[in-house]
Image: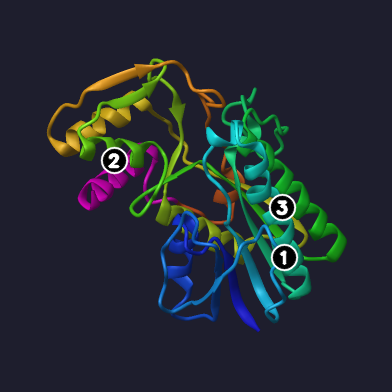
Amino acid sequence: MMDYLVTGGAGYIGGHFVDTVAKKSDVAVIDDFSTGHYVCKYARIIKADLRNMVPKIGNVRVLMHFAANPDVKGSMHDIKSHYERDVTATLNALELARKSDAETIVFASSSTVYGYAKKVPTPEESPFAPVSGYGLFKAMGENLVSYYSMSYGIRSISLRFANIIGGRTGHGIIYNYAKWIKEGKPLEVWGDGNQKKSYVYVHDLIDAIHISIKEAGKGYSVFNVGNKDQTRVNEIIEIFEDVAGKRFRIKRKDSQEGDVRNFLLDSTKLRKLGWKPKYNSSEAVRQAVIEILKDA
């Protein structure tokens, strides 16, 4: 039996997860390499597009479903394409898990399922109220995972991520800022820059994933993965300037559609399982800035 089948395993989070298990476990990666291009030499690589049904590949102990299109802004306009990558692909991944007799499914969800949450910090029992296509499709994915868990008896876990940052990332505010700095462009700030969000360092996220697999109960479980503090966009710019030792030009723009200005997840459930992140939100940002500027 294969230990792990990782969809999107050539991507940012999937690649980091594969690194932690591939040397000691039997791991296969499914990816179409449309956005992620990381290859772990210890894993079996299957180039395939999950928008199309993937044939059965043998029994699997744990299916990790990381494959998705993370472009929140793009999801507001190119709806059909995002639906296929974020919903159709999820359905096909779940069918693959069912046909492979998977014992556990782990689904990479997102804090965007909550939208403009009325309760902050936001607990898992808060209602779905997405304000972006990306958040909507993650909510639909969770419903699919819950259905497969109930209907086919597969132990399943949905993890709602805050903003995940660190080296090797290919999208997000820190990646964009590092790219614009390298190109000599001003740093774009949507609105007043006082948006407050939670950030998690990627290695802390991987620890959370492993703990959830080990400690979650039977049936279907949902866990928030977020830090207890928040970092403003203006603070991120200050951290860039502090690490780089110079000031950068700023370009102010109108507020971005689908952008939630204030979110903070209540991760009490996950912490009770033993998760203790090494970095808080601001420390995670600093570590990510150091890593990404070094690689820029």
First to last magenta residue range? 277-296
Within 10 Å of disc 3 (Cα), the crowding (few <14, some 14-19, many 20+) is some
Distance Cα–Cα, label 3 vs label 2: 32 Å
Q: Which of 191/163 is in front?
A: 191
Q: Which of 104/65 is in front?
A: 65
Residue where numbered disc 1 is placed? 53
Quick check: is 67 in the magenta stretch? no
Kindly identify which numbered label has been placed on residue 179: 2
Distance Cα–Cα, label 3 vs label 1: 9 Å
Q: Tag 3: residue type? A: Thr
Within 10 Å of disc 2 (Cα), the crowding (few <14, some 14-19, many 20+) is some
Q: Which secondary structure is most common in the magenta stretch?
A: helix
Which of pointers 3 and 2 lies earlier in the amino acid sequence? 3
Residue where numbered disc 3 is placed? 88
Q: Residue at x 13, y 31 (%)?
A: 246
Q: Residue at x 48, y 73 (%)?
A: 21
Residue 128 position, x and y percent, is 71, 34
Q: Residue furthest bottom?
A: 1
